[in-house]
Image (tube, helix red, strand yellow):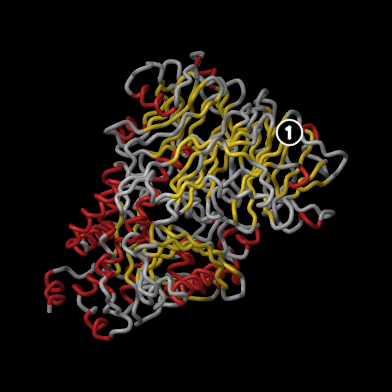
Amino acid sequence: AGAHTLASSSPPPPVPKKIPYEASAHGLTWQDPYHWMKNTNDPDFINYLNHENSYAQAFMSDTQTLQRTLFSEMKNRMPSNISTPPERWGPWLYYQYIPEGKEYPLLCRRLETEKSGWLQTVFHNVRGGFGKEEILLDWNEIAEKYGYVHVGTCRVSPDHNFLAYTIDTSGDEQFMLQIKDLRNQCIVPRLPVDGVVSLAWAQDSRTLFYTISDENQRPHRQILFCLTILLGGSDSTDDAPIFTEGDSGFCVDITSTKDGKFITVYVIDATNPLGGLRRVHKRVPGVQYFLEHHYGFFYILTNYPFSENEECSSGDYYLARCRAEKLYSANWQNIILPGEDISLQDMDIFDGHLVLFVSKKGVPMLCSINLSINFECKYQMEIENLNPWFFPLPSSSCSIVPGSNHDFMSSVYRAVLSSPVMPDMIVDYDMSRQTFSIIQQEELRGTSDGAGLNSAACELETNEVIDTRNCEDNNYQNSGLQGWKVLSRLYSCERKEVVSHDGVKIPLTILYSRKAWLRDQSSGLLQAYGAYGEVLDKGWCTDRLSLLDRGWVVAFADVRGGGGGDSSWHKFGSGLYKRNSIHDLTSCGKYLVNEGYVCKDKLCAIGYSAGCLLVGAAINMYPKLFCAAILKVPFLDICNTMLDPSLPLTKLDYEEFGNPQIQSQFEYIRSYSPYDNIPSGVCHPSVLVTASFHDARVGVWEAAKWVAKVRDRMCSACSHSVILKTNTTGGHFGEIIEENWMKRWISHSTKFGFKESESVDVNVKEKPAKLELNSSFGEAKACAKFWVIVFATAALMLSMQFLLGKLQKLMKNAHWSSIGFHIILLIHVKMTSML
């Protein structure tokens, strides 16, 4: 009766208009009555989104107490001070911090003259003690001026006198270029340039190269800008295009080699920026080249298939070396192969060391090799033959994010380490001494037992170090008695291998509280992404504790299509193999239930962007597998979107998802498209969908169309618990970078409330009486409340990492461009890859 009372006092979900529209391709015709939503300027569409937001607010109206509880938990876990350790680059120390009472970070520097501890130095500078701090960029000033800010790329000139950076002030990812003279703190006056993607300085610190995007947001043109003209007072400020990519299937990126000697798109001599372009190698579809330069030699990370080298013909990456003057030749002089069961992911280079980012059976590793390399007349060598030093890591579940590492002359490599049970830690690896130093580990406050990071609840791992080359051959030394602190006594992190539909083993990371988890009774949240070769972020997140301490299981499925293994892992989850990703996800979901980690009918799923494709398709195929789902800025209407080449990034996505202009690929895409395969008349999980109105990557209409069609086709008893919430001001990453940190906390704790009520022992699927009650708005609402706690935690898991671990990425040099990430323009992170 109470449920029916709630239903009578609450509004029904909005019902959008239908306009007949007939779509067709390859002789197939279908109806799409919500096609009109694609016109985002239609007043009816804007009104509909507003009504959906009002409905979502009404749906959550009785969770205020829960929201306040969650908000308090999350706030109490935030570190008291948020900053990054200074990083030396030339004579300067660069660092970032968020000032007290502010919402955004400052990018700062000071001359490296003080030898005191970095933390003491930063805080002393904040108080004005030295008076030597220079503020290079204040996000807060930009946000106050425009109401929104997303800083894309920052590049300091080689002489440290200029800062070139790009900003998005509307959320549409049309980044505007600005150049700041750091000697007088003034913006260099110039005509505005929008759509800027990447930047690189020439060695003269007066010539800046940048790329701009076309109307479909494809970076396609490289521009040369001479700062000297403006500084000299000339009125001639026309920028000169030097390269334009005419093939819409390719995009243009630009960066400089670590030593600053060359600019790469094609190769430009950075000491002679007007000297023309040099080609690296012939263009081959699917082949990539990443270049670094070291004293007359180019080191090239590539997957180019040499016909005479069968080992390199599978599409895996290897390292080639050649003399700079022989770059474009039939064969490169030397080849470095990764070795058995190892895949080469990325590289970095210093004056005396080569750093390789490798993966062994999905486990990330880093190693350094002394330069220069003596090949002793050998054409090919393996990494093991080069006496590598593998960096000590805490555990096999550890993720590694490279630091900025700007300084070519440094012998220290900085990385951010993290795991589901270890707070983010910044570590300096001294490659000459083969020692490591823990520079900073994220402060932990407000744990469930009142303990902090230094309590007995944490394990001090001084000896449990993985030597990633050979566990029996300790080729490392600990620096003093340092160790990393983890919470493995409170929380268990297990890595399993789940057999998918075709026998392939899928890595599954399972996280739960040793105290609160109950076998066969706990609720669970399963996350996957599976696209672009991006590795799923499984790093530390304090906000996730609000789930774990309530008995939840959080699991991460490294499905095919993502990263983590060799190139085949991505290949066999993309294009005409995309259904593998979906089956991998459902196999992992079934495993969690069958093995007792999660109670049947209490398994939920979450997807971000392209990851929603998997979740939406899995719901269509197995409607009873998940009791709830969260879809953030979701890619759901893949067939219609990919059929429209005028949409941003569509043509670039042909390689990832297939080209529906080709009939066989169209039929395959349509066979799993979430929007086109919604079953009729069946019970549907409760779903919270979030979208951003100015999203330039995934149109806001995709979420709106899917919600409307699901409500139209699904069991009427479930329609009330599918809700849509649209951010009317932000873009694709609006959930990650919002204009107000406190507002974001409040927003996320609001979304948390969507799940908590179902933690009462309610088994909707097995109790028909409950299913019948679900026909009322009140009961559907009660069932769904439990699920929002999932959303808040999942949404907030980026907040701490963005501020502490991934804050460095805002300063990150473009020379470190992980395979599969370079075409994705992030704030980031993949973020957290995460895409």
* Residue 277 x/y as whole percent: 69, 33
Res 430 quadrant in image:
top right
- Element class at badge 1: loop
Is the residue 16 above or below the residue 169 in the image?
below
Res 211 quadrant in image:
top right
Is the residue 626 above or below the residue 174 in the image?
below
* Residue 94 x/y as whole percent: 47, 27
Task: Quarter of the image for the N terminus: give it.
Answer: bottom left
Q: Which residue is mark 1?
A: 371
Is the residue 724 above or below the residue 306 in the image?
below
Residue nearest the viewer, comparing 457 with 505:
457
Few, some or many residues within 10 Å of mark 1 (<14, 14–19, 20+)? some
Is the residue 772 above or below the residue 645 in the image?
below
Query: Does residue 813 show up?
Result: no
Query: Does residue 498 show up?
Result: yes
Q: Total number of numbered labels?
A: 1
Residue at the top extreme?
232
Residue at the right extreme?
377
Left or right placement of residue 604 versus residue 409 in this view: left
Residue nearest the viewer, comparing 211 with 624:
624
* Residue 656 x/y as whole percent: 57, 59
* Residue 237 x/y as whole percent: 51, 23
Instruction: Please state which amino acid type lies under the numbered disc 1.
Output: Leu
Left or right placement of residue 655 versus residue 796 in this view: right
